[in-house]
Image (spheres, grey):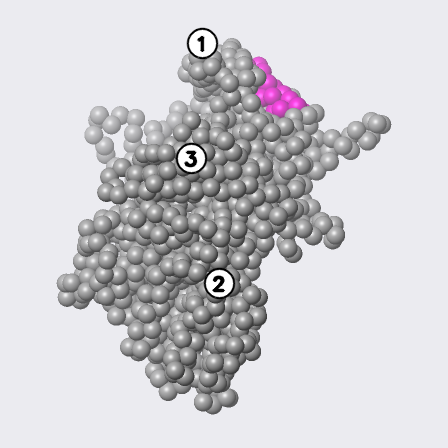
Amino acid sequence: MIRLDRVTVTYPEADRPALDDVTLQVDEGELCLVVGPTGAGKSTLLRAVNGLVPHFTGGTLAGTVSVAGRDTRTHRPRDLADVVGLVMQDPSAGFVADVVEDELAFGMEWLGVPPAVMRRRVEETLDLLGLADLRSRPLGTLSGGQRQRVAIGAALTAHPRVLVLDEPTSALDPQGAEDVLAALQRLVHDLGLTVVIAEHRLERVVQYADQVVELTGQGRLRSGSPAQVMATCAIAPPVVELARLAGWQPPPLSVRDARRRADELRLRLPTPPAAGTGAADPQALPGDGPSELLAEVRELRLRYGPVPALHEVDLRLRAGEVLALMGRNGAGKSSLLGALVGLVRPQTGQVSVGGLDPRRTEPQTLVRAVGLVPQQPGDLLYATSVAAECAQADSDAGVPTGSTTRLLSKLAPEVPAEAHPRDLSEGQRLLLALAVVLTARPRLVLLDEPTRGLDYEAKRRLVGVLRDLAGAGHGVVLATHDVELVAEVATRVAVLAEGEVVADGPAADVLAASPAFAPQVAKILAPDPWLSVPQVAAALEMVG
Amino acid sequence: MTPTQRLHRLLEPRLLHPGAWWLWALALAAAATRTTNPVVLLAVVAAAGTVVAARRSTAPWSRSFVAFVVAGGVLLVVRMAFAALVMDTAPGGTVLVRLPEVALPGWLAGVRLGGAVTAEGLLFALYQGLQLLAVLACVGAANALADPRRLLRSVPGAFYEVGVSLVVALTYAPRLVEDAVRVRAAQRLRGRPQPGLRGLARTAVPVLEGGLASSLDLAAAMDSRGFARAGDVPVRFRRATGLLVLAGLVGVAVGLFGLLGGNTLPASGAPVVALGVALALVGALLAGRRSRRTRYRPDPWTLPEWATVVCGLAAATVVLLAAARWPAAMDPVGRVPLVVPAAPWPVLAGLLVAAAPAVLTPAPPLPAAALRRPVGAVPAGAGA
C-alpha cells in the first residue's frame, strides 16, 4: 500500500538529511507504529506519505514514495486526498469549518462526492466515532478528545485507504486515548484501513501494532514485528522494560501477556512496601506533615461564565511533596494551577501561596513564591535565541548574569545557545521554560501537562529534575494524564472530577486503586503495589 | 399533498437561507437611507426588531441586534452633542439656550464653540442620527438572523475559494485574541510588569509567530484534504470566468454606492447594479458548471426565502416612491418652520410588510432538538 524506496529527504539549510536512504513497505490493512526520539524524523516520514514532504515543506526528496500506486513526485497532497487522510498533532490547527458536521464534509466537497453519498458518510462517521451528539456543536466548544475524534472523522469521510496520524493521543486523558485507539482498531479490523501512527506513549499502542518502525536517529530506520523491534528498541514502554529486567524473551507487549509470566518475578521480589507507608498516622489528612506549608487552597470555587470549573476545592501542599493532579480533560486541573498563580480569579474561597494572595501580589514578587510552566511552554519564550532568553530571565528575576544558563546546562546541556527557541524540540523547549521559571527560585513549581510530546529520554530527564527539586525542599505540582510519569515521580496524587477533588492520598494508594490510572507495572504485578520499573529494579538489586 | 400539509412543510422549523436575510436587511437599510422622517425611521427599526425577536436563533451572534442598536444610540447622542456645541446654527434659529461662546479665528468659518443652541439644530441632528441608527439596526438584524460565515458558505462555486479564505480569516482573528490572552498570562508568570509599549511588543512577537505557525499548519491540513483540487478546467477558462465575476462585483459595488449614497453619483444606481449582478451571475454559472466540487447540505431557497426578499424590496420601493412624492414629509431636515413629523400612511403600510417575515418564515430550530435523540441511538463507536 505504502512503499518507500531508498528515500532521502534533505531540508534546506540542514547539514544532514532528515531521512537517509530509507526503504519501507506497509501492506494493506496494517497498523504501523512509528517510534523514535524527538527530531528523529517521525513527522517527516509521516508527511512524506501524503506528499506534504516535499511539496509543502520544501527540501529535496530522492528515491520514490508511492501510495496505492501513485508516486508523490507527480501527485500533490491534494491529489492524494482521496487515498491518504492525515491527522495532525494539534487537531484544532487543521479545522476549517464552524461546526462538526461541516468539518466532516469539507474534504468530501472537494473530492466531488455526490450529496447523497456525503450525507450518508457523515452519518456513518458520526456513529463510528461516537460524535452523533456533537454534530451541530461549534468546534471551539469541544474537549481535546472530542476534537481529536472530529479530526479523525474529517479524514475518514473521504474514505481514504491510508490514515496517517501524528501523536493522536498525546493531549488526551487515558479514557479519551482509549476511545480514539479503540476507534482506530475498529477501522483496521472492519474496514481494512491501513494506519500509520506516530506515538510517544508506546504503552497505549504497541500491543495493537502489526509493524513497528523505529527511527534510530541520523535519519536511519529499522522495521519489523513489534516483538522483534521492542526486544532491542532504545525506547520502550514500561511493560517491555520490566520484561528486559526480568529477562523475558521475547518481551510481552501487553499487560495481559506480561501477567502470565509475572508469578515468577513476584516470587523473586522482596515483600513490597506496605501501601500508605508515607503517612505514619492513618488519621492524618493529605497535606499534613511536619515540613513547611507552601500553599493552601480553601473552599475554592471558580467558574467561567455559567460553566463551573472548580467546586469547593481544599488542598494543602508541603515542601518536598510532588503532587500529581489527574482527571479527565476539562476536570479543572489547569484552572487549579491558574488559581495558584493568580491567573484566574476565584469566585469564593482563599488561595495562599507562601503566605501571599496570588491575585493581589505584584508579578515580580510572586515569581519567588510560585512558578508555572504552562501547557505550551513556548508561551513563556519570546527572545530570538536561547542565550538572549537566558539573559532576559536573569534580569527579570534580578539574579546575577549567567544563572539561567548554568541552570539550563544542568537540565539540558545539549541545547545550543544560539538556537531559536522555536527550533528546539518539544522536550528542549520545556526544559528551557523550566530553567527560566526556576531562575527566580520559586518554592513552589507547577507544571501543566509537561510530558506532552516528550520522548522517553526527555521524560527520564524531567523525572530526575523533579526529584532533585523535591529533594531540595521545593514543592512540585504536576497536572498530567501520564500515569507512568506519575508512578515514577509523584509522592501524592489528587484526582479531580467535575471540579471536585474525588481522591487525594499517597501515590501508591490512589494509583493502584483505579484501573484507569494504574500504571502498567502496577497492573502486571497486582496485587503487590509496585508502581514503576526503577522501583522494581532497585528492589531486585537489594535482594541481589 | 393538501395545501395545508404543504404549508406545514414550508413552515417546518429550519434556518432561513442567510442570503434571504441579508437581502431583506439591505433593502430595509436602503429604505432608511432615503428618508430622515423620524417616524418612518423608528418604524424601520421596529420592523427589523420585530423580525429579529421572532426569528433569531440561539447562536452567540444572535445577540448582535441589540449591540448594533446601542452603538447607533451612542452615535446619535454624540451627534446631537456636537450639533449643540460645535456645528453652525441652523437657519430659523429658535434659540433654546445661549452657552458662553469661545471666539474662534476667522478662517474657521462655519465652526463655533458654544453660543446659541437652537431647537432646529438639535432636531435635525436627531433626525440624521436616527437615520444612522436605523441603518445600523438593519445590519445588526442581518447579523443576528444569519451568521455572516454561513452566508459565505453559500457563495457560488466560482468564489468558493475566496469564501473559504474569508472564513479562515474570520476564525483566525478570535484565535489571535485567545493567543494574546494566553501569552499575556505567560508574561505575568515570568514576573514582568504588564503595561507599556514594551509589554505589548513582548505579547505581539509570540502571538504573531504562533499565528503564522498555525496558518501554515492550517494550509498543510487544507492541502492534504483536497482543498482547491482543480477539476479538468483549462486555466484560461478559469481566468476568464474569474474576471467576469470580478467585473460584475465591481459593478454591483459601484451601483450600490450610488443607490445608498443618494445623489452623489446620479449616473449610477439601479441599472449599474443590474448589469453587475448579471455579469457576476454569468461568470459564477459558467465557473460553477465546470467545477467538480459538490455541496454538503446546501441551504435551500424556497418560498419563504422569496417572500422575505420580496417583503424587503417592497418596503424599499414604497419608501423610494414616497420620497419622490412627498419630499417635505420624507426629508424634514433643513426645512423651517418645524412641524410635528407625520408619516404618509402608504410608507407605514410598506414597513408593516417589511415586518411580515416575522410570521411568513419558518421558526428557527430549537437547540434542544439537536440533543433530543432517541435513547437507542447510542453511538456504536463510543463503547468499543
Examine the structure image and report whether residue B318 is included in the region drawn in magenta. Answer: yes
- Please state which of the two labelled residues, at mark 1 or mark 3, is closer to the viewer: 3
Helix, strand or loop under label 2: loop
User: What crowding class fits label 3: few (fewer than 14 Cα within 10 Å), some (14-19), or many (20 or more)?
Assistant: many
Classify residue B271 as left or right of residue A36.
right
Could you say where residue B230 lies in the image, as x and y percent from the top left? Answer: 48, 23
Q: Is residue A158 visible?
A: yes
Amino acid type of the residue that numbered disc 1 sits on in the rendered structure: Ala
**Given the image, what chain letter belongs to the residue carrying mark 2?**
A
**Which kind of residue does numbered mark 3 sit on?**
Val
Give the structural element (helix, strand or loop) at label 1.
loop
Task: Give the class, few, some or many, for how many residues have Cα within 10 Å of label 2's Cα (few <14, many ≥20).
Answer: few
Magenta-drawn stretch contains A49 = no
How many marks are shown on the rendered structure?
A: 3
Residue at 36% x, 54% y is A37
Residue A487 percent across, percent down from the top left: 45, 71
As shown in the figure, which amino acid type bears the numbered disc 2? Answer: Pro
